[in-house]
Image: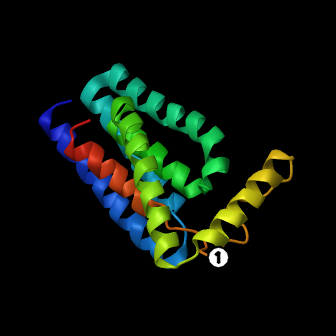
Amino acid sequence: MHHWDELTATGIMLAMLGVSIVTDLRTGKVLNVLTVPCAIAGLTLGVIAGGLMGASDRLLAAAVVMMILFFLSPLAGLGGGDVKLLMAIGAIQGLHFAIWAMLFTGIAGGLLAIYTVAKRRKLKQTATNLLSNMLSKSAGVSTDLAAGSAVGKIPYSLAIAAGALVALVLRF
């Protein structure tokens, strides 16, 4: 990527993450009206900056994120908006960045969950509920892992933003 490409991609990603956090905190949703155009902008930037190779890297990134999260999101309790947000990050920044951003997002998500449970003093209740939901899921019962949670859903866009920012700062 050229310097202007990196700055543009970074600007698009940071703006998308900022708006996603606000909407997630207010409504509990990451909006398609934001992630889809940002992903298209990322793919377009890939074509402009790197031609077919740039576009294929970004398409591959979005596809790899989708395939990984297709299997992990039910276990992690990620919503569709969270998955699309991570896919858009891949489309904007490319495969290498997307892999590292997902890794750091997982770490940040774990820390956010621990912090939220501890702050609300619901460790025993959360552990019991999670175990029950995991057992139901393994028995083939369709259930959300957060169903019945005393803590409720956590705005995961915070963890996604933290993961992407760590990857950005460490230059992955």
Place of residue 131 in the rendered image (x, y in percent of width and height, measured from the top left): 72, 57
Furthest residue in direction top, as rendered: 53
Badge 1 crowding class, 10 Å Cα cut-off, few under 14, some 14 to 19, many 20 or more, is some
Residue designated by label 1? 150
Measuring from the top left, give residue 153's x and y in whole percent. Answer: 59, 69
Q: Which quarter of the figure is the N terminus placed in?
A: top left
Along the line of sight, the residue nearer the viewer: 118 or 86: 118
The kind of residue tagged 1 is Ala
Query: Could one spot residue 9 in this view of the protein?
Result: no
What is the tally of numbered marks visible in this picture? Answer: 1
Place of residue 169 in the rendered image (x, y in percent of width and height, measured from the top left):
20, 46
Identify the residue at the far left of this view.
3
Residue at 25% x, 30% y: name it. 49
Q: Is residue 166 visible?
A: yes
Nearest the eye: 33 or 106: 106
Left or right of 94 in this view: 30: right
Q: Is residue 170 left or right of residue 46?
A: left
